[in-house]
Image (cartoon, grey):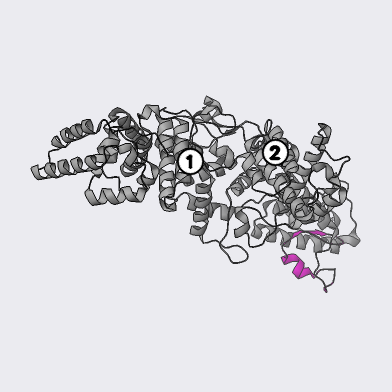
Amino acid sequence: MTAPVVDCRVDADALLGDYLDYVAGLGLSNRAVRDRTRIARAFLSRNPNLAAWMTLPVTARVTELRSVGAWPLLCYAIGGDRVRLDVELAAVKQLTGLGAAVEARDPAGFATMRDAGHRLGWTGSWVETVLGECLAVMLACRGGLIADLTEQTLADFDAALSVSTIPSTSRRAYRARLASLRRLLFETRVVDTAPRRRVWARSLEQRFTEVVMAEPIRDSLVRYVRVRAAVLRPKSVESLINDLLPFAEYLTAHHPTITCLGGLDRACVEGYLVWNRTRGWRGQRAAAGGGRTVSAAVAQSAVLSLRNLLDDITAWGWQQAPPRRLVFAADVPKLNQPLPRALTPDVDAAIMNAVAHLNDPFARIGLTVLRGAGLRVGELLDLELGSIVDYGAAGTWLKVPLGKLATERMVPLSAAILAALDEWAAQRGAHRPLAHPRTGAITDFLFTAHGRRLGYTRLRNGLLAASRATGLRAPDGDLLTVTPHQLRHTWATELANAGMSLQALMALLGHVTPQMTIRYATLASPTLKSAYDEAMGKMRRQLTLTPIGKPILPDKVSWLHSEMLKTRVAHGYCARHESAGACPYANICETCDNYITAPEFRDALTDQLADIQALKTDAQTRGWTDEAARHDRVADALNDHLQRLNR
């Protein structure tokens, strides 16, 4: 950081006098006081203009400071804002005593910052590191008090780190402290811009500058993205950029003669469609992808974005638009429609039991809420402190914020989920509300720690740890991998299995179209299961239960002892499968008041009565009470018929 310095040439004597008074009050021994006095006089006599001395090469300054031991004097001058430090010197010199010297300039400001660090739950050592090795250094470079710091000051210091020759390890260390310092300055309201999670995020222009393409094409793409960004969410803008950059790369590599979008033709687009389906990953994923191609969803999104780009600029009358339509609906890759990846009940129970024993409280509570309320991860992270609403007799509900589909909804909370949310709210601590990343509205998010929002990574890592703890294996033998979104699928499938209507399930899931919810009905539907069972019952009545290779007419002894709902009629046997239920027509004739028999049927009725009594005993043994009662009624009717014949 190149900061203005103070010309100390005329004030050297005043500086020496003030420094000697300061040394006298340190309680040092007489010998130490004499040594410091001698060093200070000699150093200032050689360098009466400290401003000029600070412009010397950093190696020369460090060498002289080490040889003469004048750092305490220079540290006192910097702390008193008589001369300014520079980043180069700060990176190579041990800054012993600088933090205390600068803090003496603004003790109240440092005390406020220290209290804020402790309130955010930081360790005492990290608070002192941020204050002494970042804040003090910044004030030493810039001068002034903490209250004078601005966003521009922080940006200038960061820029000075970028262009300095300090080692990369020192640069990373300073930036880590600088990120925490931004948090402290925001918490104490010195600055009003909350720290970004990704301070290194590239701008729109930077994203398109990194890819080689013709300038007219770059200008058109940047202009288009900027127009769409006015109505799209940040994540959607990021996706749009990721879709358009591969097309620009394709044009540069395969059609370098095309320098504007108006020069596109159908042959070029057809080549891109083939290339797009087989292209590899870009950016950071390219190295870790192992040559893998992009998924069908990524390929489809890229084609849709290209079609929208060309259609939009044509409809808007842009001069760069192609003369005719080039991308059609038939060019968009079709995606498979897989069922929700719900966990089976035994795997679900094992995973959630392991989640309950995670050491990370955020992973443990966050995953519990995801599973118990069916939330998307983004919805969980966007929950606010006021999201829990008690409706008295109607129970406690969770207000799920605007998420993926820009809809709010209410989800009922069980006692276990409510307890988990209360546990987190109790240990979360207090800090300044943050600006919402989409709307900019000041929001008191529920899932925060140390003054910053928590993210997806800890949830993902927690679920992986829980999966490893269970020891469950995938079909290929590897450890079972479970994603946080599968917990939502499991929750919805459980409700569908329990018979919840599609309308209610659609409302709880926050779906905007019935088609999104019908997948769960396809996966598990009690209505579908009942219809299947009824149809199978009808089919069984038409199919013989006799094993293949055996006669259709059953052996009497085997039939009497078989596990089926058996009925004996005068002219034969009935073998009805138990799953079909009791037959409403069994022995209806023998028990009918209009039934009339004759003497020639006496032997058949006698055999039937004997079988009925055996069936009654068999039913009683199996515990089929209704069947035993039916056989008893038939036996009584047969006895009456035989008695009439005997008379």
Q: Is mark 2 on a helix, strand or loop?
A: helix
**Which of the numbered marks, if any, corresponds to residue 222?**
2
Camera-nearest residue between 194 and 407: 194
Rendered position, 136 above or below 266: above
Task: Point out the image quarter for the C terminus.
Answer: bottom right
Residue 577 covered by magenta stretch:
no
Which of the 4 quarters of the picture holds residue 478?
Answer: bottom right
Q: Is mark 1 on a helix, strand or loop?
A: helix
Seen at 14% across and 45% down, the residue is 35
Horizontal side, residue 146 vs residue 575: left or right: left
User: Closer to us: mark 2 or mark 1?
Assistant: 1
Q: Which one is earlier in the sequence, the residue at label 2 or at label 1?
A: 1
In x, y percent, where is residue 116?
Answer: 36, 33
Rendered position, 155 above or below 327: above
Task: Point out the image quarter for the N terminus.
Answer: top left
In x, y percent, where is residue 38?
Answer: 15, 43
In x, y percent, where is residue 627?
Answer: 72, 53
Q: Which residues are drawn in magenta?
A: 549-574
Per the model, the C-alpha gap separating discs 2 and 1 is 25 Å
The reply to whether the C-beta atoms of the residues labelled 2 and 1 are less than 8 Å apart is no
Q: On the image, numbered disc 1 is attached to which residue?
A: 159
Q: What residue type is labelled 1?
A: Ala
Camera-nearest residue between 217 and 343: 217
Horizontal side, residue 209 vs residue 91: left or right: right
Horizontal side, residue 322 vs residue 624: left or right: right
In x, y percent, where is residue 440?
Answer: 56, 29
